[in-house]
Amino acid sequence: MSDIAILRQLSLDNGSQPYNRRMQTRGQYVPLIGVLLLSLFVPPCGGQQQSDSALPEEFTAMRSALCDKPTDFTETGCKVCPAFMAESAELPLNGGLGINSILFGSFTSVGKTEALLSSGSCFAHADGFASAILLRQEQGSWRRLSFFHRDGPIGICWKIPGQSDTRDLLLCNAEDYGLGGFGVIALEPNGKVKTESALVQTWTNPIRALEKQKHCSSLDADVKKVSFNSIEISVFLNSFDVDPPIDCFDESEGTTSKISNSTKVEDTAVFTRNGDNFAPDDRTKKLLAEVEKSR
């Protein structure tokens, strides 16, 4: 079977509207994949974070590990951005801290009770407004173990469940202005990042171009399944040439320009576990190599 057959490539007629699956704005920069990242929405599958409309009861006690003083407590965070966040800021902090999602697990060691709290507040967009805070419960109270800003487990994160002798890992996705990706993160016992490995990069290309383009492409992705042994990610490629040129980001839907060399791919990338990392299987290697050619 050819690579194209594996990809289940579909062509559009010149008169058809281009397949348009736009990526959602989610984040800021993560060196793991070298692209701009963030995420502020709730993922659609199991094992994901909770939205701020349904923060768990435990969050009431967690605020003592976040806010500078009790009078700063709010229903979803702190009235004033905590002092510890300013240490990584290059620009002044804005407003207060709002927690939009919480993920429970044992991320640093087996048997630990921990929570990853994600936020998109306090930092300016130019300063990387995505951040996360790792808390651990000990002797009945929560304490702050780590703070992540610009890198580490920021964005939307899923728990990769551990086993009786293996801690949980994190699968995180964050995107901003049409660039982003998914990666696996393993933490040290002290809460620091041990390893980060990229799985899938996503894009809308070109993005914010000054001139109209003759070629448009985008790759979007969603988590399909997460287990101890494997991760499945649905990928959606849209690529086409257009004449006369258009603004790919704003004009691809409903354009009257002539469409040619159109490729639409909807497939599943599978990654299998190797210690703290996940590697693509042979079919996925071919899939990712082929979609990259359309970028």
Image: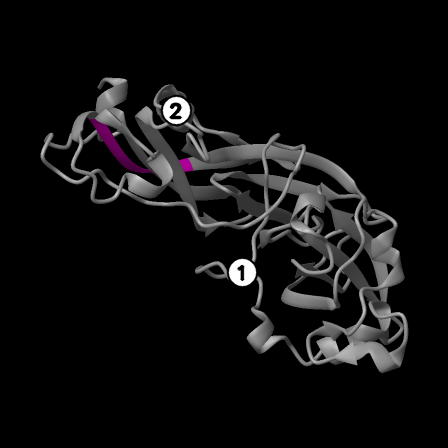
Label 1–label 2 contact, CB within 8 A: no
Left or right of 174? Residue 125 is: right
**215 or 228, which lies in front?**
215
Label tally: 2
Which quadrant is the N terminus positioned in? top left
**On the image, numbered disc 1 is attached to which residue?**
47
Residue 263 shown in magenta: yes
Which secondary structure type mostly characterizes the magenta part of the structure?
strand
- Residue 252: image tag: none
Left or right of 85? Residue 44 is: left
Which quadrant is the C terminus positioned in? top left
- Residue 258 is drawn in which quadrant? top left
Q: What residue appears at the point 45 percent right and 59 percent down from the top-left corner? A: 45
**Residue 294 in the image, given as x and y percentages of width and height:** 34, 23
**Residue 288 in the image, given as x and y percentages of width and height:** 41, 26
Residue 86 shown in magenta: no
Q: Secondary structure at mark 1?
A: loop
86 is higher (above) or lower (below) than 152: below
Q: Secondary structure at mark 2?
A: loop
Amino acid bearing label 1: Gly
In this view, the residue farthest toward the front is 210
- Residue 5 is drawn in which quadrant? top left
- Crowding around mark 1 (Cα neighbors within 10 Å: few <14, some 14 to 19, many 20+) is some
Residue 10 in sight in this render: yes
238 is higher (above) or lower (below) than 215: below
**Residue 108 in the image, given as x and y percentages of width and height:** 77, 51
Residue 268 in sight in this render: no
Q: Earlier in the sequence, mark 1 or mark 2?
A: 1
Q: What residue appears at the point 32 percent right and 45 percent down from the top-left corner? A: 21
User: Which one is in front in this view, the residue at disc 1 or the one at disc 2?
Assistant: 2
**On the image, numbered disc 2 is attached to which residue?**
295
- In the rendered structure, which segment of residues is drawn in magenta? 262-269
